[in-house]
Amino acid sequence: MAAGMKQPTRILILGGGYVGLYTALGLQKKLRLNEASVTVVDPQPHMTYQPFLPEAAAGSIEPRSVVVPLRPTLRRCHIVTARVRKIEHARRMVTVSAAGHIEEIGYDVLVVALGSVARLLPVPGLAECGISFKTIGEAIYLRNHVLSRMDLAASTLDPQLRKRLLTFTFVGGGFAGIESLAELEDMARYACRYYENIEAEDMRWVLVEAAGRILPEVRDSLGVWTVEQLEKRGIEIYLSTTVKTFEGGHVLLSDGTEFDSDTIVWNAGVKANPVLANSDLPIDSRGRVTCTASMRVEGLPEVWSAGDCAAVPDLSRTKEDPTATCAPNAQHAVREARLLAKNIMTAMRGGTPKDYYHKNVGSVASLGIHKGVADTFNVKVKGFPAWLMHRAYHVSRMPTFNRKVRILMDWVVAGVFRREVVALGQINDPKADFDLAARS
Ligand SMILES: Cc1cc2nc3c(=O)[nH]c(=O)nc-3n(C[C@H](O)[C@H](O)[C@H](O)COP(=O)(O)OP(=O)(O)OC[C@H]3O[C@@H](n4cnc5c(N)ncnc54)[C@H](O)[C@@H]3O)c2cc1C
């Protein structure tokens, strides 16, 4: 850079998920040459389109199709594959770790897009026996795990062990919980045709929800309808019930029901990324970064935040509730990110950023092949049309043309050749054979 020339503004984006990817895409499209450099930090080299994780777990979509690789997509950005450990805005410095090595990255403008993590409760055995359903790794693991439980159950003569292997427990009746349960049950039911000694009735699928209803994102009547549909499929649903213990895979519910289960999937809510506690940013009682409606962090004009980790006022609801903030969902994350990119550029060029406003347009959920539920634009839709809407909506939202086409092709292939239900169990323990060879 020649002396006297203005240095490009250093924009640092923490997290390459919905908010991180869309903000970076917006910036790389609109920034003038040498106006700014954009760096994205994420421990994963890809963004994950989470609403498609249940279909990836069920084998309707290839896992690679539901992730968007950051490097080829963000060609004008720098990608740092590392985990953020600390944010010190007073020094304009972020500490990251990569391959065990600690480094510091400086910035002029910071975007905090670190998302959320599973909210665990102090239930004995949960940390040891449970798994959540938030990442592509967890979706792949659960697919292989469920199918390998069926393989093992079909091969054992021990009735108690078989029962335990074929009992699948899901906790949490929000979208992630219901979709993952419904899609995996649908896949396992389909897979039964290839097992001479497993019928759908031999499997036990259990949902436990602390509230008195499921799917709070849709109207009560649709929540009730979904419970009825799942119960018709033989899924046991325990509402207004909590889990007392999971110790050793033994599940004890608050109503006294107990059983053994080899699969425990925990989807009981999310909380803001805990790394935010290791920062000097203003944080609310739920651990989220407190923001203004233009997504600027309160009192810090060079710092912006949005998505699951941010408390952004929900202006569509502040009349009824002045403290309302945007719910942690993709609907907000994507729209926030698009405006965020514009606001950052406007602020850099001396303008006034706009406030974020979005009125919820409803929700769609898949409950297995040809089954769904939707509540959008005040219209309730059930069954096959809702499932079609789910697919159409999400494929239209999937970032990049490349991924849209891949997903459509995956659906066509799965439709023509039937879905693939083989467990690649070794993925969950790839070193087992090598360790055995080393010991022999
Ligand atoms: C199974 C499932 C289904 C869903 N279905 C729907 C749906 O149908 N509709 C809907 O509206 N919403 C849905 N959601 C919610 C939606 O996906 C989230 O609200 C959305 O992803 C939030 O975007 P975000 O950018 O805030 O977080 P994310 O997209 O989660 O991005 C956060 C990023 O931060 C990275 N990160 C984490 N820790 C660090 C660190 N220490 N350092 C650096 N980077 C880090 C992560 O790797 C990730 O890439 C679903 C969620 C799940 C789990």
Image (spheres, rainbow, N blue to C red):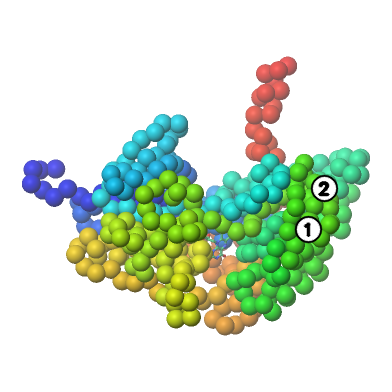
Where in the figure is residue 279, as x and y percent of width and height?
Answer: 39, 47
Three-letter amino acid code of the residue under disc 2: Asp
Marked residue nearer the N-terminal end (2 or 1): 1
- Report the residue that reaches farthest toward the left: 4
Q: How many marks?
A: 2
Distance from disc 2 to disc 1, alpha carbons, whole Å, reads 15 Å
**SS for dot 2:** strand
119 left or right, relative to 284: right
4 left or right, relative to 428: left
Q: Which mark is residue 243?
A: none
Where in the figure is residue 190, as x and y percent of width and height?
Answer: 77, 57
The residue pinned by badge 1 equals: 254
Three-letter amino acid code of the residue under disc 1: Ser
Q: Is residue 189 above or below residue 153?
A: below
Residue depicted at x 28% and y 53%? 109
Residue depicted at x 66% and y 38%? 428
